[in-house]
Amino acid sequence: MESAGLRRAYDEVLAEVDAGRFESPGGGGLSAAQIVAHLAVNDELMSEATEAVLAGSPFAYYDLETVHRPQLDALVVERGGLYGLATLLRATSLRLCALVDRLDPVAAQTPVDTRLHEDVDLRVDEALPWARVLDLHARVHLPKHLAQLRALRPEFDSHRR
């Protein structure tokens, strides 16, 4: 399986993080650092699932907005803020993409018990081929968080002007 689409999605997110100038979220939303922490932790879960698929082991993947805010906040502090987390996300995304590149067509179709809840955009609670979960990550999950990051930059959010 090829990771080109996944790599492009990560490149967009990381370019947005590198652009910086984020404001605090309103209405209880996630901060830029919390978003990046969530993505890095989620990458680790997806890498574990991909390793299990490669090994032929059963695995379940649950993105429960993976970690609660106290854990996200602890990771933000541990990594020294947004830019330390960006370094972590670069590493976790590269690892995931490298694992994805190792998936042959048969392994990519391995059903994995999956639970995804992305607001109202995406609700999955069933076994899906792992390639489909990776596709949803690249085409729905990462773009959702890219949009959240952009909304935290005043030049992209007309409501903040």
Image: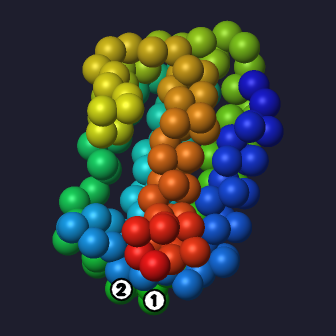
| Residue hosting label 1 | 80
Viewport quadrant of the N terminus = top right
Q: Give residue 56's quadrant in the image.
A: top right
| Depth order, front residue of 138/26 | 26
Q: Residue at x 55, y 56 (%)?
A: 146
Q: Residue at x 62, y 46 (%)?
A: 96
Where is residue 129 drawn, in percent x and y?
Answer: 52, 15
Assess disc 1: are there few (<14), some (14-19) or many (≥20) residues with their C-alpha within 10 Å of its C-alpha: few
Q: Amino acid at mark 1?
A: Gly
Specify how the rendered protein is coloured: rainbow
Viewed as shown, does residue 12 lie left or right of 147?
right
| Depth order, front residue of 156/96 | 156
Label for residue 77? 2
Q: Amino acid at mark 2?
A: Val
Where is residue 51 drawn, in percent x and y?
Answer: 56, 36
Viewed as shown, does residue 161 lie left or right of 131?
left
Mark 2 and mark 1 in contact? Answer it, CB < 8 Å: yes
Seen in the picture, residue 87 relative to 56 is either above or below; the reply is: below
Q: Tag 1's secondary structure?
A: loop
Q: Residue at x 52, y 74 (%)?
A: 153
